[in-house]
Structures are given as C-alpha cells and as structure tokens.
Image (cartoon, grey):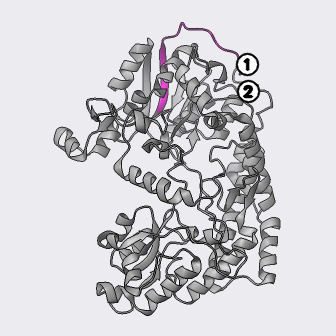
Amino acid sequence: MKKKIVSAILISSMMLSVTACGKGGNGGVTNSGELNESTEQTSFTITGGQSALSPGYDDNEVLNQMMKDSGIEIEWNTQANDPNASDDPLKQQVNIQIASGDLPDAYMGVGFQNYELSSYGADGTFIDLTPYLTSDVMPNLTAILDEHPEIKAAITMDDGCIYGLPAGEQMGTAGIGKEDDYSIFSVPQFSMINKKWLDELGLEVPSTLDELQTALEAFKENDMAAKTYGAPAGSTIPMSTGFDQWCWGQNVFYAGFGFTNWINDVCNDLVLNPDGKVDFVCDNEEYRDALTYFSDWYKEGLIDKEIFSQDDTQLMAKCQQGYVGVSTWWYIEELMGDYAEDYVFLPVLTDPEGTKYEGQSNVTIRTGGGTNSGNLSITSACESPINLLKFFDKWYEGENVMQLQYGPIGVYFKDKDENGVWNSITEEQAKAEYGKGAGELKGYYEVAGPKLILSDYYMNTFHMEDRAIERLTDLYDYWMPQVKDTSVYPIDCVFTSEELETIDTYKTDFENAVSEQEGLWLKEGGPTDEEWDAYVDMLNNSCGMQELLKAYQDAYDRYKEAM
C-alpha cells in the first residue's frame, strides 16, 4: 500500500524534531525551556480565525475588558476560517508568514494539528509554554492542569514541550450534578423498542438477544405497523438502523458478545482493556460469533434490508411513519416523532442462551470531545510572552469563557437562577430584542481561541442546553449502570512522527477492509474457518494491524506517563 503524499510532507518536516525540547533553527531561535522574564512589550499582534458571523474582535466588549484588566493592547488580524479545509485561506496566510519569518506575536484559532505544533516548536517558530505554566503567570490554567492531568497530557508533545494552550468542551454528567463524570459521547447509541407492540403481543421488554429475536419475529409475523397504526399491509420493519453509524448504528447490539465496536475518532474497532493494553476487536472470536449470529436475523428479514444503504433521514422517515419496531438514536422523541410515547429504551442485552456468552454483556464505552492545543501558540517574535499569557489566563475563568463562547452578560446571558447560575437568552427573546435567533447571536459574539469549558461550569456558572441535560440524564441513570468496564482509549494521545506515518499508511485501508468484510458477513452469513483465517492473515500482513497496535500502544503508554 502506498503512503499518502501528506505523509512524505509530514515526515520531512518532522525530521527536524529531536529528543531535546525544541532544538532547531528559525534565525537561530531555540526553545531553551527557560522563562523569558521581559515585561516591556504591552502591544501585540495576533493572527487568527473567527466565526463566519463575527464582525471581528476590535469592538468585542469582553475581549476589550480583559485586555484593559491585563494592561495590554492587541491588534487583531482575523478572518473566517475552516481548520479542516485544505484550502482554508487563513491556513494559507499562516503558512506564508511562517515560511517568510514575518511572524505575529501569536496565532489564535488557527487549528494547528499536533504534528504542526511539534514541527514549529522544533524549528523555533513557536515557544515552549511549559515555563509559563506557573501560579505566578497563569494561575487559572495551572490550577486546572493540576486538577486535570489528562488535559496536560493531551497538550504535551512527544518532545515533552507544550506549544499550545488547551481548548475543548467537557460536556459530561458532572455538569448535571452527578458524582461521576462521563462524557456525553460515552454510549453513542441508545436502543429503543415499541412497548405498545410488545404489550399487544403479551411480551415483556427483552433482556436477552434471544428474547429480542422472539419479539422481532412476532412484530414481523403480526405486521404490527399495519395492525396497530393502520400502516399499509406488509410495511412493518422489525428492526432498522444504519450500518456502523454514529448514533444510529447496529453496534450496541454486539454488547451481548462482550464488545461494542463504535465508530470513533481514534481508530474504529480499537479498544483499551482494563490492563492498559490496546486491542482490536475485529479479529476476536467474539466478533466472529456476533456476525454469524446477526446474519441469521438479516436472512430472516428481522433487520431492515436497507441497513447498508439508507441515510439517517430515510431511517427517521420510516420510524416517524410507525413502521419500525426497534432502532437506535440519541433521543426517542426525535427519531419516533408522533409515536414516541409508544417506545421505551431497550436495555443492553445479554448473550444468546446455550452459548459460551450466556448471561454476559459488555458495552465498551467510547471517548469524545477531546482537548486540542492548536488554538493559541506564542511565536518567537513575541518579546514579552508573560504579559500576553497573563491575558490568556483570564480565558480560563468560568464566566469569561462562557462569554467568549456565547456572548456577553447582558446580551446572551440575562439573569441568574436561584443558585446564581446564568440563564442564557431564549430563542424568542433573541429574535424580539436583536432580530436574530440565539444561534445566530452566538455566532456574532463567539471568539475563536483556547476556550476550555469544564463540566462543573455547567453546574456553577451557566446552564447547558435542555437536550444535553436530557441526554446526560439518560446516560447516567439508565445506560452507565449497565457498563461493566469504563476503560477507554483517550482521544488526546499525542503521536510521534513515526507513529503518525504508520497511522497515515495503514489506518484508512484497515478500517475499510474491516467494515467491508463485516457488512459482507452480516449479509451473506458468518465466515467459514477458511475465510476467517484468510481475513485475519489479511489484517496482519496486508493492513498493518500489528503496526497500528504498536503505534497506539506506545502513544497511550506515553500519555499515562505524562499524567
């Protein structure tokens, strides 16, 4: 398999990196790891991004007050940008500036990737921020990093340096007052079943896969959509989902075989075991047995024949016409529409009776959100980093980041509840007072940059949106009690240039090969011994599975060491 061109570019730039922190040349500038004590500079220039709806930051009252409190002035050179677009004009401008050495004092909201931070740190373009993460210079951020070592691990590059301040949103169950903090992304698929159909058939809500199979067979045989809702004859679809989709896939049902291979942001089918070892589930016997088991459901017409081709709008249309007995989504009301009151959550189902998995189940939770450090970097042109970083330390206060994310107090936040927590403006209020919706108002005032929203801010500073509260409540009260092991591979692992090369070389082809074969076996029946052996051999010898495992394991081991 050929390496992608981006790998060659990436590796050539990363060859500058050495073990010592940031030794390299940009006009002789190095990252010595020492604090620059100068405080003479008080006027700074920053190049960065902004929301498409933003008028720019010159008249932003929140930023202006923070600058006044910090005793500095900033010239903002910003434009709307898309960090994920290859032709992003801001990234093009930044590349030109860095190549020419004509640098601003800092870059904000650009969205640098970790390999770019490492490269620009190695050649001296970006300074190492580690010496400034002290209670004297950045007391707010230092306290956060002390309390959340996983955030510090996420922003520490493989050379031990920090070239960007952290940003991210920890939307978790701590934000609704729960003792344990689970990410809203922990269990992406909530399974649901038509309880009204079960009642009419005299069946209980299933607790095992075999009981669910019995229910699905009864839904089909009795044409429950037609019988209960007057739908066209033969329109009943016992079970319909997407195939390997985010919140509307079939993956939650694999829990009966001891795993759930969620789509995730690291690598599909990758899991972290309780002993700290990484693994892929796609070459395990449990995985093979699951595909063989569910292929019978597909063959019998219990699973929608369009599972492999339909999109989420097509699934939603079927559900909201009352055709579907079992499905997955984040919210019952959103998926089932007028029929929502007839549905209940379907619990994590235990394994088929008479098998080695009987009575067992396991939901492998997934990571989400993540912390990035690509939205604020100080360049070697900055003469007094202390002064600028003291300003950015104010971003790590709850009320400040609240306003930088949504809008000023008095505009987006009108009043507090009885507990002193800010209430955001309603859609109706926004349209009446400002002639635009709350979302548009947010886009106007939002500032791109190192915004770190912690879960407890939602309890102590401002309220999260109602739908997120509902989702997190369901997650904590219903789904997490069914999770036996909360080990999860962190989305924030930092990779070396060699590891990135391995991932870039193999990951896409590996994921595609696994997904293609998974779908084929679900449709056509589980694998024979010969087919299975050939498949495992392909993953190991053609798709780089062992190389990927080593890259992910090594990165995880460093991540744990950095905490």
> Magenta segment: does it hold 75?
no
Tell me, for residue 22, which label it has, or none.
2
- Residue 229, how many percent across, how many down? 30, 84
The foreground one among 448 and 149 is 149
Question: Which region shows up in magenta?
Answer: 29-48
Q: Which residue is mark 1?
A: 32
- 144 up-or-down from 318: above or below: above
Q: Amino acid at mark 2?
A: Gly
Horizontal side of 426 relative to 470 (left or right) equals: left
Going 52% across and 88% down the picture, which residue do you hit? 301
- Residue 267, how many percent across, how many down? 66, 57
- Distance from disc 2 to disc 1, alpha carbons, whole Å, reads 7 Å
Looking at marks 2 and 1 on the same chain, the residue that comes earlier in the sequence is marked by 2
- 307 up-or-down from 170: above or below: below
> Magenta segment: does it hold 39?
yes
- Residue 108, how many percent across, how many down? 50, 31
> Which corner quadrant of the image does residue 366 belong to?
bottom right
Mark 1 secondary-structure assignment: loop
Image quadrant in which the N terminus is located: bottom right
Horizontal side of 70 relative to 358 (left or right) equals: left
- The reply to whether residue 353 is visible in this rendering is yes
Please tell me how crowded label 2 is: few (under 14), some (14-19), or many (20+) other residues with Cα within 10 Å: many
- 105 up-or-down from 353: above or below: above
Please tell me how crowded label 1 is: few (under 14), some (14-19), or many (20+) other residues with Cα within 10 Å: some
The foreground one among 187 and 483 is 483
Mark 2 secondary-structure assignment: loop
Q: Are marks 2 and 1 in contact (CB under 8 Å)?
A: yes
- Residue 281, how many percent across, how many down? 71, 65
Going 69% across and 35% down the picture, which residue do you hit? 563
